[in-house]
Image: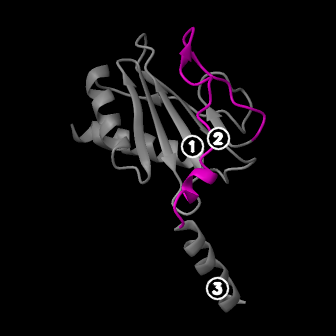
Amino acid sequence: MGTLLAVLLSGMVWFAALPGFEQIFAGSTPENLGVTSGQLAPCPDTPNCVNSQISTDSVHSIEPLHYQGNLENTRSLLMEILGVVPGTTIVESQDDYIRAEAHSRLMGFVDDLEFYFPGDRPVIEVRSASRLGESDLGVNRRRLEQIRLALADLEQGS
């Protein structure tokens, strides 16, 4: 069984090395990204999205990121963190909003990460969603929780 799995995986790695392969599973950039009337887009019904603002069910709901310092320093720390998250690229950066794309290593699936700084309280509203598929096996939630921990660690070290 182990040999069969190794052969299958080696075939997938070879297939994944083909030019343009990563675009097959990348999906298109959703048109509803960004902040509208102070809100990030709601999650779809599929369980591959988390949102700190609109979602009230346990599948999609996640706490916003809380920060202690000033907004400008926290925003810089978040940009620094996103710069070292594997496969992640910042694609839009404004004073109150950051959007990044996270690409999976093997198949090239893309998740859209959004960070909104409302400015009226020390929180960062977050949304992370897979472009394709039904389930993300918890990847979007885990990635945001790791970013939460990294932000808290960096703030304490400042």
Which mark, by number, is residue 89? none
Q: Position of residue 52 (x, y in %)?
A: 59, 28
Write down the quadrant of residue 147 in the picture.
top left
Quadrant placement of the C terminus: top left
Circle 1 Cα neighbour tier, 10 Å, few/some/many (<14 / 14–19 / ≥20):
many
Q: Which is in the foreground here, disc 1 or disc 3?
A: 3
67 left or right of 129 in image: left
Whole-number angstrom distance, CA of label 2 to CA of label 1: 6 Å
For residue 105, above or below residue 134: below
SS at badge 2: loop
Q: Which residue is mark 2?
A: 131
Mark 2–mark 1 contact, CB under 8 Å?
yes
Residue extending farthest right: 45
Which mark, by number, is residue 111? 1
Q: Position of residue 54 (x, y in %)?
A: 66, 22
For residue 77, above or below residue 72: below
**Amino acid type at image mark 2:** Arg
Highlighted range, magenta: 18-46
**Amino acid type at image mark 1:** Asp
SS at badge 3: helix
Nearer-the-camera pick, 10 or 120: 10
Which residue is located at x 73 percent, y 42 percent?
A: 47
Residue extending farthest left: 158
Which mark, by number, is residue 7? 3
